[in-house]
């Protein structure tokens, strides 16, 4: 296969991944890395490096809109970013220490969890418990406009959310994904923030987390321009088209289809890791 054909196919595949990732909220990285490894036979670490570059690019575009609309909570995001950045540096460090088989199996498990998380219905419920003293001290609170009604909120269980964020950052640095599903888990479930605030703040954080680990991948030579460029451009195009389609698309159906795809990829990654094919 010539370089041009390889780059063109990679670009088209990345565009589809970016489109589906944008429509389902999971991002393109969760499907891109296994597709590059299993179909394009790209080395796992180079696939992760290219995915990190695309995560930075897509997060930067989407985060600006959410911050402008006042949905992202920058104060909470910057605090939790300390945990995810430390985790991302650890994950990137572990990449050179952990075998491809272990990374592949871990990736497969994360894909299965992402499929579960994307299909699970969430609904924000007001909590009666008093605000976390640490959240009060750090002013981890805010408000947002929900269908014409302004709702106020305050973070709960800050240490627990901080710990989960460290794990999310480690997975991001190790696997080259945004870890959005785990970040939303920390804010939505552990810290009891409204779902819209959790998802948009997670989107704001994803790019910063990926940038922390991408520097280590770049220093180690795992970011190959011939792979990273078509992947980044394809994901950007797909994400832009997906954002435009989001209003009209039947998202539940897309989520179901996308979940089937990432479950299949997750099972294949686990099988390939167990049988030593990575």
Image (cartoon, helix red, strand yellow):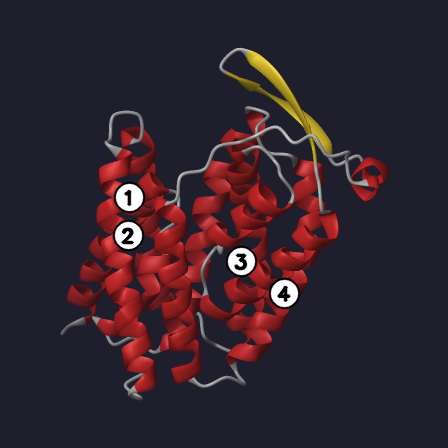
The one nearer the camera, 117 or 243, is: 117
* Residue that label 4 marks: 87
| Residue 207 in sight from this viewpoint | yes
Residue 17, percent across and down? 28, 52
Q: Is residue 19 left or right of residue 67?
A: left
> Helix, strand or loop at disc 2?
helix
Of marks 3 and 4, which one's residue comes earlier in the chain? 4
Q: CA distance from mark 3 to mark 1?
A: 24 Å
Q: CA distance from mark 1 to mark 4?
A: 28 Å
Q: CA distance from mark 1 to mark 2?
A: 6 Å
> Helix, strand or loop at disc 4?
helix
> Helix, strand or loop at disc 3?
helix
Residue 79, percent across and down? 72, 47
**Image point 39% across, 55% down: which residue?**
114
The one nearer the camera, 223 or 94, is: 94
Q: CA distance from mark 3 to mark 4?
A: 11 Å
Of marks 3 and 1, which one's residue comes earlier in the chain? 3
* Residue that label 3 marks: 210
Whether residues under marks 1 and 2 lie with C-beta atoms below 8 angstroms apart, the answer is yes
Whether residues under marks 3 and 1 lie with C-beta atoms below 8 angstroms apart, the answer is no
**Image point 38% across, 66% down: which residue?**
225
| Residue 26 in sight from this viewpoint | no
* Residue that label 2 marks: 259
């Amino acid at each position: 296969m010539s370089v041009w054909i390889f780059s063109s196919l990679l670009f088209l595949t990345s565009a589809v991944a970016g489109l589906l990732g944008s429509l389902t909220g999971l991002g393109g990285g969760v499907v891109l890395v296994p597709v590059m490894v299993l179909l394009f036979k790209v080395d796992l670490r180079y696939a992760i490096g290219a995915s990190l570059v695309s995560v930075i690019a897509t997060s930067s575009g989407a985060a600006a809109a959410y911050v402008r609309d006042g949905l992202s909570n920058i104060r909470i995001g910057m605090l939790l970013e300390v945990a995810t950045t430390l985790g991302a540096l650890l994950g990137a460090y572990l990449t050179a220490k952990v075998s491809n088989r272990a990374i592949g199996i871990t990736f497969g498990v994360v894909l299965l969890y992402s499929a579960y998380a994307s299909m699970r219905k969430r609904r924000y419920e007001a909590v009666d418990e008093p605000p976390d003293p640490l959240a009060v001290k750090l002013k981890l609170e805010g408000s947002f406009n929900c269908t014409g009604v302004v709702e106020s909120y305050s973070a709960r269980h800050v240490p627990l959310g901080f710990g989960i964020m460290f794990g999310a950052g480690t997975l991001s640095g190790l696997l080259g994904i945004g870890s959005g599903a785990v970040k939303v888990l920390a804010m939505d479930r552990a810290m009891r923030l409204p779902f819209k605030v959790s998802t948009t703040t997670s989107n704001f954080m994803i790019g910063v987390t990926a940038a922390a680990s991408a520097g280590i991948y770049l220093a180690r030579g795992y970011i190959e321009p011939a792979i990273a460029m078509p992947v980044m451009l394809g994901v950007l195009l797909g994400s832009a088209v997906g954002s435009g389609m989001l209003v009209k698309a039947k998202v539940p159906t897309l989520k179901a289809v996308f979940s089937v795809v990432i479950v299949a990829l997750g099972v294949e990654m686990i099988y390939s890791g167990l049988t030593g094919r990575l």
